Every structure is written in C-alpha cells, then in structure tokens.
Amino acid sequence: MKSSTSKSSVISQILLAAVAIALGYLLLFGKSVALITLCQILCGGIVAIGAASIASFFLAGDYRRIDRYGFALGTLLVLMGLIGLIRINEVTANFEIYTGLVSLILGVLVLQGTVQMKVLDYPVWILNLVISLASIAGAFCVLSGITVITGKIAGFSSWILLICGCACLFSMLVTWICILLAARREKKTEAEKAAAAERAEQARIEAEEKAKQEEQARKAAEAAQAQAIEQARREAAALAKAEAEAQAQAQRDEMAAKAAEAKAQAAEEANNNFPPVEGPELVFGSDQGDDNSIQ
C-alpha cells in the first residue's frame, strides 16, 4: 500500500513540526532568547522546509508524476521565508499571528492523519481526532484573538504551538504504523486470496479430471454394453440358426421316416395283393413208384 503523500511532503511536515516544537519550547522556557531571534528561526525554518521540499522533488523522482507539487510548494516556502527575514520587524510585531498560522497548519495535518486512520479502520483514530480538533480550536482562538480564552493561560499561543508540533509528530508516527500494519494485513489478505484461488483452481482441475475419468468410464461402460449386446445378438443369431437347422433336420428325419413308413406300407400292400405261387411237391424215395406210375 502506498502512502497518499509524497516523500517531499512527509519531510516538510517533519521539519515544520520540529520548528514548531523548537519555537514553542524557546518561547516558554527560553526566556533569554530575544523574540526577533525566534522570528528569524521561524523564517529560517520555513526556508529550510522549502529547500528540503525542492530537493526531495528531484531525489524522489516526483518530477515524473503530474500530481506532485513539491517543487512549487518548496519554491513558495523559500520565497515566504526570505520575505519574512527581510521584513523581520513586521514578523516580530505580528509573531503571534504567524505562530497561530503554523499551529493551524499542524492541526489540519493531524486531522488528515485522523482521516487516514479511520479509513484504515484503526480505533486509535478517535484519540487522534480529539488531538486534531483541540489543536485546530486552539489555533483558531489564537488567530481570532479571543482573549476570553487566550488571556486565561500565560503563553497560550506558545503552548498551542508546542502541542501542535508534538501532536503532528505523534500523528505521523501512528499513521505510519497504521499504514505498515494495513500493508501487512492487505498482503496477508492477498496471500489468502491467492491461496484460495489456487485451491479453487486445483479443485477445478481435480473436478475436471474426475469428470473426464467418469466420462471415460461411461464411454467404456457403453462400449462394453454395446459389445455385450452385439455378443448376445450374435449368440442369439447362432442359437436361432442352430434351432432352425435342428428343426430342418427334424423335418427331414420326419419326412424320411414317413417315406420309409410309406415304403414299408406299400411293400406290405404289394405282398397282400400278389401272394406267392405254390410249386409241385417233390417226393423222394417212397414216391418212386408214383413216378413210375406217372410214366
């Protein structure tokens, strides 16, 4: 997951927060430091932030993208810082206004971190929201000159500047951690999705292989069934042929038997119609006188 801000803007935020913390600390606890010196530190810090933004624009390769304005922002900050150094007396006279503007910018940056945490769905965004709203409200009071609130606390604008600087650094750190955790979570989710997709693809391949095997088994069963049907048909045809041949043979045998029976019957009828002729009896011995008598 990529951060929504470029490297140049991150560096600018860190430097701005560091300058705010340094100014707030010196205003509150550096009593020996002259106010004009603090104004020079503020303007010099703005120049440094602008120069860092310009350098980061080239070093980070932001010139390759149309949605990066680090160079323009850096140039603007450098010019503003230089103008502030030139007109340092006017800056000193209105120093509280400038610190209020810096505090307001930092408060808005903290609010952006709050939005990022909310979108990334981390509960710490609630704490960051309270800090950002308090920072923006304090900066608004300083810029609006509401003495009813600012007059009750000594160095109110300095405290707001110090708090906003610390809040900005804290918000950036927490946002960075949330982005890293979200990146890991997204990477884990993508890995799980990839694993699920791989398992689904493997299951699909196995299902296709199983369907192919089932189709092959079905075709083999159909072929075996067709072969069995063909074999049964052939056996039935052979059996029918054998039965037909046996029946024909039986008919021939029956006709032969009938023919033999008819022949036997005809022979018997022939014997009955034409009996055999009886021949003269021949007498031997005692019949010799008869023969003589006959003679």
Image (cartoon, grey):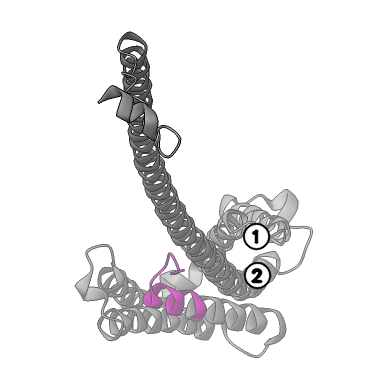
Across and down, in percent, residue 25 comes to: 66, 82
Q: Does residue 50 appear anywhere in the picture?
A: yes
Q: Which residue is mark 1?
A: 135
Q: Quadrant of residue 170?
A: bottom right
Mark 1 and mark 2 in contact (Cβ < 8 Å)?
yes
Q: Image point 77% across, 63% down: which residue?
A: 153
Asked if residue 120 is positioned above or below residue 191 in the image, the reply reads: above
Across and down, in percent, residue 270 comes to: 30, 14
Pick whichever, 71 or 280, lies toward us.
280
Q: Does residue 256 appear anywhere in the picture?
A: no
Across and down, in percent, residue 132 comes to: 64, 58
Pick whichever, 66 or 32, lies toward us.
66
**Which residue sits furthest top?**
273
Name the element at disc 1.
Answer: helix
Query: Mark 2 and mark 1: span between their CA atoms?
Result: 8 Å
The mark nearer the N terminus, 2 or 1, is 1
Viewport quadrant of the C terminus = top left
Across and down, in percent, residue 14 comes to: 51, 79
Q: Neighbour class for label 1 at 10 Å: few (<14), some, many (≥20)?
A: many
Pick whichever, 156 or 47, lies toward us.
47
Q: Quadrant of residue 12?
A: bottom left
**Label annotation for residue 167:** 2
Q: Image point 42% across, 68% down: which residue?
A: 5
Residues rendered magenta in the picture? 1-14
Q: Does the magenta segment cover residue 3?
A: yes
Asked if residue 35 is positioned above or below residue 276 in the image, the reply reads: below
Q: Image point 34% across, 14% down: which residue?
A: 275
Q: Amino acid at mark 2?
A: Ala
